[in-house]
Image (tube, rainbow, N blue to C red):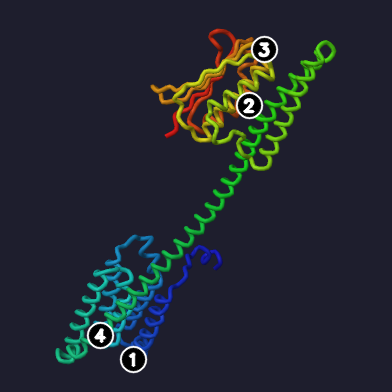
Amino acid sequence: MKELTKNIPFRKIHATDASALVATLALSAPSLYDYFINRFEYRWVALGLYFSIFFLLVLREEILQKSRLPVSFYLSIQTALIIGLLTLPPHHDFVIILFFILSALATRLEPGKKGYYWIAIFTIITIIFFFLSVGIENALYRLPIYAGGYLFFGAFSASATKAEIARRESETLLEDLTAAHLKLQTYAAQAEELAVAEERNRLAREMHDTLGHRLTVAIIQLEGAERLVDEEPERARIMLGTIKEQMRAAFSELRQALATLREPLHADIPIANALKSLGENFQEATDIKVKMAFAHNIPELPNEYRVAIYRAAQEALTNAQRHAKAETIHISLLLNEKDQTLDLRVKDNGIGFPDKANKIGFGLRGIQERASQLDGIMRLEANPNGGAQICLCLPLPK
């Protein structure tokens, strides 16, 4: 028995369906009792018709969904079964009440005008039945009662169906909103993680661009002071003073980076003046000659542009000092009106690219990231006149 029943599909019976089943059983009980107690000839036919109506009500959803029968065909079968019961002697007139159940079912299965067309059909069948059984006068007398009842049950079922559809749509919408909310929470967590990672990268770039530059200059100065301390103590003392200033500046920039993460490039300083100050300080600290050329028509730039250009120049100077063994460095910032770009070039006359020149270090990677954020590019190239050059090309801000 368990094997037979475990595969039978059970569904939750709706309140309207349950009411229809109870009403059908309540109506069929006295009719069948009369058929069998009086041993009418068609009692087994009546039992089969009632059973068919009940069976079709119980398995209505399964029949319509799996067999894909049209709703009109299903309602036609039920209507034919009720007509069959009405035509069986002794012609129980209360069987007509089944059309109340069918009216509610019609407006539920056939929304809109189609459902009320079926109510009109049920009304016509009712008139014909009463006309044949009790005469035209009694038929017209009973017509408003049954027609009004059909309309009432049909309208009530239509309203209940609409309310049920609205409830299901609300539940679906709530599920969608809940799923969307969970996705938004996930996206927010991911965005927060990305923001933290980006801020970490930014802080790492700041540390490298500020402290790395200052400490590199200080190391070079210390090495020079160490060599000159015996032969030229005065010059060594001056170099130590420069180192002290570099360390103070490095400490100040470190404190700024950790406390506020602000760019050390003030917003009120034009980029050409900032680059000029950077080149002069570098030349004074390293004895490497810095030549500079800046276009006079550079427009006012947003802070992220100015920082990207400044940091690129700073990184290029640091690399030239540490790796190139250069004697002269050229810095230029020009406006390419044809391509609508700003072109920063820092080139030296040093030894050129080492054997592992294809390996981009952390500082150059930071320049690439800044360039990419502004839809620009960074190139590390050989200087046609010997040495190497870094090119940063940024589209003009709109």
Return the mark for residue 363.
Answer: 2
Tell me: 287 left or right of 40.
right
Is the residue under label 2 in contact with that under label 1 (CB below 8 Å)?
Answer: no
- Numbered disc 3: secondary structure: loop
| Badge nearest the viewer, 3 or 4 | 3
Type of amino acid under label 3 = Lys
- Numbered disc 1: secondary structure: loop
Return the mark for residue 38.
Answer: 1
Type of amino acid under label 1 = Asn
Q: Going from the N terminus, do you reach mark 2 or mark 3 first? A: 3
Check disc 4 and report the residue beneath it: 146
Q: Going from the N terminus, do you reach mark 4 or mark 1 first? A: 1
Tell me: 187 left or right of 36.
right
In 3D space, how far apart are the residues under numbered discs 2 and 4 (Cα atoms)?
Answer: 90 Å
Check disc 3 and report the residue beneath it: 325
Residue 265: image location, x then y, percent? 59, 33
Residue 389 in view here: no
Q: Looking at the image, which residue is at 74% across and 19% down?
A: 220
Tell me: 270 left or right of 362.
left
In 3D space, how far apart are the residues under numbered discs 4 and 1 (Cα atoms)?
Answer: 29 Å
Q: Is residue 307 above or below residue 48?
A: above
| Badge nearest the viewer, 2 or 3 | 3
| Mark 2 closeness class: few <14, some 14–19, many ≥20 residues within 10 Å | many
In 3D space, how far apart are the residues under numbered discs 3 and 4 (Cα atoms)?
Answer: 108 Å
